[in-house]
Amino acid sequence: MKKPPGEEPKDELTVTPPKKWAAGVPAVVHALEYSLEQTSPVRTGETLLTMNQVGGIDCPGCAWADPSPGHRHRNEYCENGAKHINDEATTRRVTADFFRRYPVSELARRSDMWLNHQGRLTEPMVKRPGSDHYEPISWTDAFGLLSAELTSLDSPDEAVFYTSGRVGNEAAFVLQLFARALGTNNLPDCSNMCHESSGFALHETLGTGKGTVSLHDLHHADLIFLVGQNPGTNHPRQLSALEQAKLNGARIIAVNPLPEAGLLRFKNPQKARGVIGHGVQIADRFLHIRPGGDLALFQALNRLLLEAEDARPGQVLDHDFIRANTSGFEEFAEHVRAISWEEVLTATELTREEIEKVRDDVLRSERVIVCWAMGVTQHKHGVATIREIVNFLMLRGNIGRAGTGACPVRGHSNVQGDRTMGIWEQMPDSFLDALQREFGFDPPRAHGLDSVNSIKAMREGRIKLFLGVAGNFVRAAPDSAVTEEAMRRCRLTAYISTKLNRSHAVCGRAALILPTLGRTERDFQAGGEQFVTVENSMSEVHTSRGRLKPASKLLLSEVAILCRLARRTLDGEPDIPWDRFEADYGAIRDRISRIVPGLHDFNRRVARPGGIQLPNPVNEGVFPTAVGKALFTCNAWEMPHTPDGHLLLQTLRSHDQWNTIPYTSDDRYRGIHGSRRVVLVNPADLTELGLSEGQHVDLVSVWTDKVRRRAEDFEVVPYPTARGSAASYYPETQVLVPLDSVAEISNQPTSKGIVVRLEPTGARRSPKTTPS
Ligand SMILES: Nc1nc2c(c(=O)[nH]1)N[C@H]1C(S)=C(S)[C@@H](COP(=O)(O)OP(=O)(O)OC[C@H]3O[C@@H](n4cnc5c(=O)[nH]c(N)nc54)[C@H](O)[C@@H]3O)O[C@H]1N2
Ligand SMILES: Nc1nc2c(c(=O)[nH]1)N[C@H]1C(S)=C(S)[C@@H](COP(=O)(O)OP(=O)(O)OC[C@H]3O[C@@H](n4cnc5c(=O)[nH]c(N)nc54)[C@H](O)[C@@H]3O)O[C@H]1N2
Ligand code: SF4
Ligand SMILES: [Mo]
C-alpha cells in the first residue's frame, strides 16, 4: 500500500508555449505515470482493459459515448479517463488514524489536491457537535443519527439531497424516491451548475431537454461547430469521432476565446499513424471569440442566412421543415433582421468577413451539428444562446435528420441518467404521477431547491440537514465564503463519498462521512453480484460492472447506504421494499421500467451488448413543446459589460483535474507547469493595464452587492486569450463568483463571465519561461 503524502505540493510555476496538438504518445505516457503513482501495474491493467468495453467498467470520467459493440478499440479510453479511474483505484487509504492525527480545522486549511491524494475513505466517521475531530462510528449508529435528525425536522423541506452525475441510475432512483417519500423535492445536483441552461433552452424550443445527436450522426455530418468546449481535455474521445468525421469529409469550426490544443490538431494514440505522425487538423476555422459573444455570433449568422434566402428565394432555408414543424418564424425573422452589425462585432471581437465565411460554410453543408459545453451554458444569457443555436439549426432543417442536430456535450458520466431517474427539483407531473401509481404515495408537487437556492436557504437557516452523494458541493458551488458559512450553519451534513474532499472539512455542526464503493469495485449483495447502469451524452443506457476488490471491508454500496437509511427513516410508510432493492438492483430496474418512458423491459434490454438507445421524439419528427411544434424564439442580448481597467474572467478546468479535484499543478496543453494560481491574459491587455509577465496580482471581483470578493496571489501569464478577457482555474477562483450572478431562467452560476480587476501585490517572479 502506498503511503499518503504528508507535504503539500510545492507551488513553482514554469511556463512553456501552449501545445498545438492534443493526445499522441505523451498522453499515453502521462496517463500511465499518474496511474502507477496511485496504484499498481496489475490494478491498472485490471481496470483499464475492461474500461468502456461491453460488460466492463464505464469510465467514471465524462459522458462521451462508446462506439457500438464490435467497433471498440482494445484500449477504448483516453489519457484522462485512465487518470480518473486510477484516482479511484488508488492503493492509498484514509483510516481512523488519519482523522486522529488531523483535526477538521486543519483539513479545512489543506488544498483540494492534498485532501484527494490521501486516498480512499475506509470506514464511517462522525464529527460530533463541538468536536474538532472525526471519530469512527458504526454503520448502524450512523444511520441512527441521520434518521433521527431527518425525523426531527419541522418539515422535510428542511433537508437537501445533493448529487453529482457520478451516481449510477439505481442509486439515483433510490435517492429521489427516498426524498419524495419523505416529502421533499429538494434535489439539487451538479447539473444545476453545468448544463442547466441547455436543459431549459432545449426543452422550451424542441420539447426535450436532451441532445439529438448520435455518434453516427457526428461521423456523417458535413459541418460541426464546437462552441465553448475544450474536447482535448474534457471529452478526449470526442476527438476520435471528429477525426472520423473529417475522414468522411466534414469541416469543423471551433468557437473559443482560447486556441485550445485539442481544437487545433489531434494525434490519435489508438492508431499508429497518430502515435508517430502529424495527426489530423481538427478545426478548419477558429473563431477567436470574446467570451459571452456566442449569442451575437449565432444571431448574425441567422441574419446572414435570411439575407441569403432573400437573394436566392427558395434555395437557402428549409421551408418544408419550417412550415411543418415550427412556430414563431415570422417574429424571429423580424427580430434577427434588425440586429446591429456594430454591436455584433463589438460583442464577438470577430470581423464581418470571418462571420460571412462561416455563413458560406453553412450554405455549402447539407448536414450541420452544433456541439457546446460550459463556455456557452455558464453565462448570464446561456439559455438565450442555446435558443439561438436551435433557431440556427432549424433554419436549414438541421434537426431530426441523420448527420444533423443539437449536441450538448455532458460532463459527469451519468449526469444525464440521473435526470432521467428523477434527480431534479422540478420533475414534471407525468413523472410524479407515475411514482404515485407505482408506489402508492403522494409525492410533493411544489418545486424544490436547486443548488443556488439551497445555499440561500442554508444561509438563512432554513435548511438543517444536507446529504451529499458523490460530489464536493462546497467547492463546486459559487461564492466560496458565502457557501462555506451557509454549510456551517447546518445541524448535520453527511456525504456518501469515495475520497476525502473539502466538503468533509467545511461541514455542519455535526458531520458524517459515509464511505462507499466506487465504480471500479465488485459489488456483492444478498442477491449476488450486482452491476449498475448509466446513460451517456447520446442517451444510450448501458451497464457498468466493477472488477476490483473493494478498498475496505467496511464500505457499503451507494444503493445499500440509501436503502438502509430510507428503511430506518421511513419505518414502512410508504410501503417500499428497500430490502429487496438493496439485495438485487434488478428489482429497482423493474420499477424504473414502469416509470421512465423508453426503459420498459429494462433488465432484459440493458443486458444486450451496447444496451438501450433511449428514443428522442425530435428524431421521430415529434416536438412535444407546449404548442406541439418546435419554437423559433426572439432573444434579446446584452453584452457582458466590463468597465475600463477590468477583464471578463472565465473559470475553467486544467488538463490534470477532475472538476473540483486537481490531480497535479500542471496543465500540459496550455504550457502551465507547477502552479494553478495563474491568470491568463492577452499580452495587449497586459500592456494596457500596465501589468507584465510574472507579476503577482490579486483577482478582485466586481459585483453590484459591493461584497469584497478577492482571490489572492495569482501570477500573470501572457496568453492568446481573446481581448478583454482572462482565464483562471476553478475551483481556486470559486470565491470570485457571486451567488447572485446567475444565468437568466436556468439559475446557473455564471462561472465563465465574472468581471474582475487585477490588483498588483508587489511580488514578481524571475521569468522562468522555458522553450517547449
Ligand atoms: N479531464 C476532465 N474532463 C472533464 C471534466 C474535468 O474536470 N476534467 N469535467 C467534466 C464536466 S462535469 C464537464 S461539465 C465538462 C466540461 O467541459 P468544458 O465545457 O470543455 O470545460 P471547461 O474547462 O469549463 O471549458 C470551457 C471551454 O469554453 C471556453 N469558453 C469560455 N467562455 C466562452 C465563451 O463565452 N464562448 C465560447 N465560445 N467559449 C468559451 C473555454 O475557453 C474552454 O475552452 O467536462 C467533463 N470532463
Ligand atoms: N467556477 C466554476 N464552478 C463550477 C464549474 C466551473 O466550470 N467553474 N463547473 C461546474 C460543473 S460543470 C460541475 S459538474 C460541478 C462539479 O461538482 P461535483 O460533481 O460536486 O464535484 P466533483 O469534483 O466531481 O466531486 C468529487 C468528489 O466526488 C466523490 N466521488 C467520486 N466518485 C464517487 C463515486 O463513485 N461515488 C461517490 N459516492 N462519491 C464519489 C469523491 O469523494 C470526490 O471528492 O462544478 C461546477 N462548478
Ligand atoms: S473521453 Fe470521457 S468517457 Fe471516454 S475515456 Fe475519456 S474521460 Fe472516459
Ligand atoms: Mo459538469
Image (tube, rainbow, N blue to C red):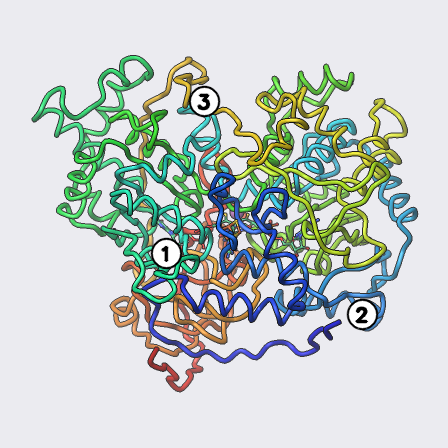
Q: In terms of image quadrants, where is residue 41?
A: bottom right
Task: Give the residue furthest to the left.
Answer: 311
On screen, residue 180 versus residue 64, left or right, reads right
Q: Which residue is mark 3?
A: 207
The percent position of residue 331, horizontal first and vertical second, equals: 26, 20
Q: Nearer the viewer, residue 607 or 138?
A: 607
Of mark 1 and mark 3, the one earlier in the sequence is 3
Q: Is residue 358 above or below residue 541?
A: below
Of mark 2 and mark 3, the one earlier in the sequence is 2
Q: Which residue is mark 2?
A: 98
Circle 3 packing at 10 Å, graded few (<14), some (14-19), many (20+), is: many
User: Label 1 vs label 3: CA separation?
Assistant: 33 Å
Q: Which residue is mark 1?
A: 648
Mark 1 vs mark 3, foreground winner is: 3
User: Label 2 vs label 3: CA separation?
Assistant: 51 Å
| Quarter of the image with the N terminus in it | bottom right
The reply to whether the C-beta atoms of the residues labelled 2 and 3 are less than 8 Å apart is no
Residue appearing at x 76%, y 53% in the figure? 508
What is the three-letter code of the residue carrying label 2?
Phe
The percent position of residue 610, horizontal first and vertical second, equals: 55, 36
Number of the label disc, if any, that sits on residue 95: none
Q: In terms of image quadrants, where is residue 128?
A: bottom right
Of mark 2 and mark 1, the one earlier in the sequence is 2
User: Label 2 vs label 1: CA separation?
Assistant: 42 Å
What is the three-letter code of the residue carrying label 1?
Leu
Note whether ligand 1 is within 8 Å of mark 1: no
